Amino acid sequence: MTEQGTPPAASRRPGGPRRDAVRVPGDGPPGAEARIRRRVLKAALLTVAALPVAAAVWIGVTGVFARSELVAAQRDLEALRQPAMSAQSSHFARQRLAAVRSAAVHAARAHRLTSGPAWYTAALLPVAGEPLSTVRGAASAADRLAGEVLTPLAGALPAAAPDGHGGGMAKALMGLRQYAPRLVRAAQVTAEVRADVHRLPGTTWLSAADRARDRLARQLDRLAPVMTDVSVAARVLPPMLGAQGERHYFVAFQNIAEARGTGGVPGAFAVLRADRGRLSFERFGNNTEMSTVDADLDLGPDFTARYQGDAPTRVWANSNMSPHFPYAARIWAAAWRKHTGERVDGVLAVDPVTLSRFLQVTGPARTADGTELTAANVVDLTERTSYARYGDLTRRKAFFVEAARAAAGRLMAAADDARTLPGLLLAAHGAERDGRLKVWSAHAQEQQLLASRPYAGTLPDTPGPFAGLVVNNAAGSKLDYYLDRSLAWQAEGDGCAAGDRPVTATVTLANRAPAAGLPSYVTLREDHPPYRTRPGDNRLLVSYYAGVGATLTGAELDGRPAMLSPGVERGHSVFTLDLELPARSRRTLVLHLLEPHADRTPTLLRQPLVTPVRTVLKPGGACHA
């Protein structure tokens, strides 16, 4: 017998552990295994509980760094606005591109800092994650804009030759041809980013994120149309500037002291030649030369029905009564071919305000008699002062041609200088944005691209809320220099209501012409009205363009019932009033309409005259269903 508790010798293995040293389930003190499980569970719970804290710390730290990167990117882009950086030497061109690339690097870092698992997961949380989603989206937008939009745009801008002169437009043409695919893609990216930013949460618990999102959305709302213009220009400007062969264009200078649908009555004109980016004017003339030319053109039954009494294809002064610029352009091109046998490749229209924008870049121009044309005086000189200075009609018309020739000469010299070319492009963009520079191409594919842009001057024929005030001078005077216009559009009722919606359009016209002291040519009444008038009294055909399918239920002029003539142009309902507007008077026309789709802000038609039209648009109650 062995001692009690000692195992038999046969049960031992040489070199092996003692049996009582082996832990098996169920052995050991009661509850030990439960305590171990509790410790493991507690550690796991602590780890899980610490994850949100760690994630919050990570988001906070990376958020600070991301904000720093975005601020750095913004500083780089702000530097592009400095006068030195806009200079067009090769040195500053390199600086410009370096600044854009630096902004792209900073924006990319901000995007990476807000793209990790912590940010992604936290942004999915309801309510709490909304501002994080906004921040992530804004960083992504900044990354794409800097890298895919601004970089190709900066590279496409021309740099000057070492001496700063020569070949500006030709070099810009080469740059457009080279960068066209990237510029088209940049416009697409801008549209995509704009849509993405507008989908981001706009009202969260973090006001700073909301403000940043709203600021970015506004910037994109301004940038997207510009990039679309750049995209269209990259595709149409090379052929239009003669990259594939010589082109010729009829250029009309509109006199906005006498209102017409596209702006002002066509006065002086020129023929512009473009050959591989080199521009030159071949001929100048005035409206007297074109006054007896019959364009012999059929623009369709709707156009004929609306304007047949004014004979726009036969009477040069009435050729642009319609606000749809392609109508006027086709008439002018057909009339020029009838007059000379020459076919033009397109038509451009400018006015003195456009010349003022260009002269601000080029500097003053001088006419043959020494008259100085500047950005500050060209509008007043051509639209008012010249009528008092030149009593003889022939001499006055000759002055208008000389003024156009002098301004065109400065413009051509500036277009050939890469230092001033970017400024001219910005001036042209401002003029086309205001509807003062209009372009039409006789080539169908080019015109199809141009048609959707503001500088095409097209009257859209698509359904939707619409508001347009168009005046045509019916007196033959030059009194529209003194004309003030305002238009207030207001939809009424519930935006959820089906069918047509009530709309009130209020038109106010004021004649600021002095009662005495104006030259007789300014105040003449070629309409010879059967009633008595005084010098300075004006007469206008006032047309209101409503949406497609709109109907007029009533109208008042100065508080009394008024009868308007109905018409249709490119699908739009048009209502016209023949209005006498005495000197120093103000008249108010109120139209009551029923208009389909009047549940949002209307598309606005702006007729460019000396004084811009003032507008107030009130879409009315929104739909909350």
Image: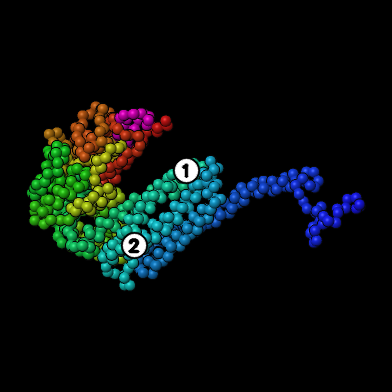
Residue 460 appears in view = yes
Query: Relative to the observer, which residue lies in front, 597 or 383?
Result: 597
Q: What SS does tag 2 mark?
A: helix
Residue at 51% in and 42% down: 204
Label 1: few (<14), some or many (≥20) within 10 Å?
Answer: many
- Residue 245 image position (x, y, % from top left): 19, 63
Q: Which residues are magenta?
A: 487-506
Residue 616: % across, % down: 34, 38
What label sits on residue 202 in the rendered view? Answer: 1
Residue situated furthest bottom in the rendering? 162
- Left or right of 162 on screen, residue 14: right
Q: Position of residue 611 (x, y in %)?
A: 28, 46
In the rendered structure, find residue 239 and report the number of the disc placed on it.
Answer: none
User: Any magenta on residue 434?
Assistant: no
Q: Is residue 47 left or right of residue 618?
A: right
Quarter holding the C terminus?
top left
Cα separation between marks 1 and 2: 34 Å
* Amino acid tagged 2: Ala
Residue 156 — which label?
Answer: 2
User: In this orientation, does residue 483 appear?
Assistant: no
Determine the residue positioned at 18% across, 60% down: 247
Q: Residue at x 14, y 43 (%)?
A: 299
Task: Using the rendered view, name the quadrant where residue 366 is placed.
Answer: bottom left
Three-letter amino acid code at disc 1? Gly
Q: In the drawing, does residue 70 fall left or right of residue 86?
A: right
Find out whether residue 500 is within the magenta segment: yes
Q: Is residue 428 above or below residue 419?
A: above
The image quadrant that residue 156 belongs to is bottom left
Closer to us: 539 or 343: 343
Drawn side of residue 528 relative to residue 201, left or right: left
